[in-house]
Amino acid sequence: MPLHADLCVRLQNAARARLRTVAIPSTKDNLSIVSILLQHGFIHNVTRGTVAGPSTAAYNQAGVASRRLWVDLKYRLDDRPVLESMSAVSKPSRKLSMATDELLRLATGRRAKTINPLEMGEIGIVDCGKNGWWEIRDAIKRKLSGEVVARAS
């Protein structure tokens, strides 16, 4: 399973189980994706730590295998998770790279390639290679193309 698909499953399952905090492997890609989720208000906080728990001091001394990102999930007043669903779009068997005009179609409610359009309140996460990871609308503003990795609502 690709790393971004594993991240999607972990976050979605944690939200469904009503967990307040979930640990995910600490990688640059995972940090980029959760940073986008934090920026768009789907999660509450991200802290570096180890398998034992969130602690920046322990993170700096830990080996690479035991480093984790601790993600605090966000919930509404009626205890429903803000991150209701998160799914991988691109898979190893089907990588979906899109040009800027295809990303625009997807973001404005039209089908692009085989992907259903984004709905209201939904974001798409795009890996733009050397230009980094971006939310789909930010990638369009910067005229970047890339692989559509995940969608979250």
Image: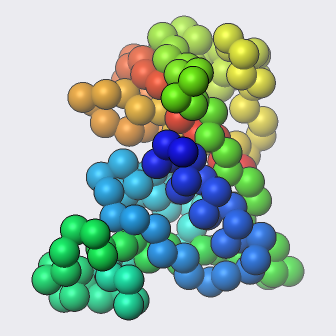
Q: Nearer the viewer, residue 56 or 134?
A: 56
Residue 96 can be seen, yes or no:
yes
**Quadrant in the picture for the N terminus:** top right
Q: Is residue 127 above or below residue 49?
A: above
Residue at the extreme left of the image, as rendered: 61
Determine the residue positioned at 57% across, 31% down: 91
Question: Residue 22, how many percent across, how many down?
Answer: 54, 76
Question: Residue 113, how many percent across, how many down?
Answer: 67, 11
What coloring was used for the rendering? Answer: rainbow
Determine the residue positioned at 69% across, 61% down: 12
Residue at the extreme right of the image, as rendered: 78
Question: Residue 136, how many percent across, how many down?
Answer: 53, 31
Q: Is residue 141 above or below residue 110?
A: below
Determine the residue positioned at 81% across, 81% down: 79
Instruction: Name the image quarter holding residue 145.
Output: top left
In the rendered view, does 123 fall on the left or right side of 79? left
Q: Is residue 142 above or below residue 153?
A: above
Instruction: Name the image quarter holding residue 77.
Output: bottom right
Residue 76 can be seen, yes or no:
no
Q: Report the number of discs.
A: 0
Q: Is residue 12 above or below residue 111?
A: below
In the rendered view, does 27 fall on the left or right side of 18? left
Question: Residue 33, how many percent across, how many down?
Answer: 45, 51
Determine the residue positioned at 52% across, 29% down: 92
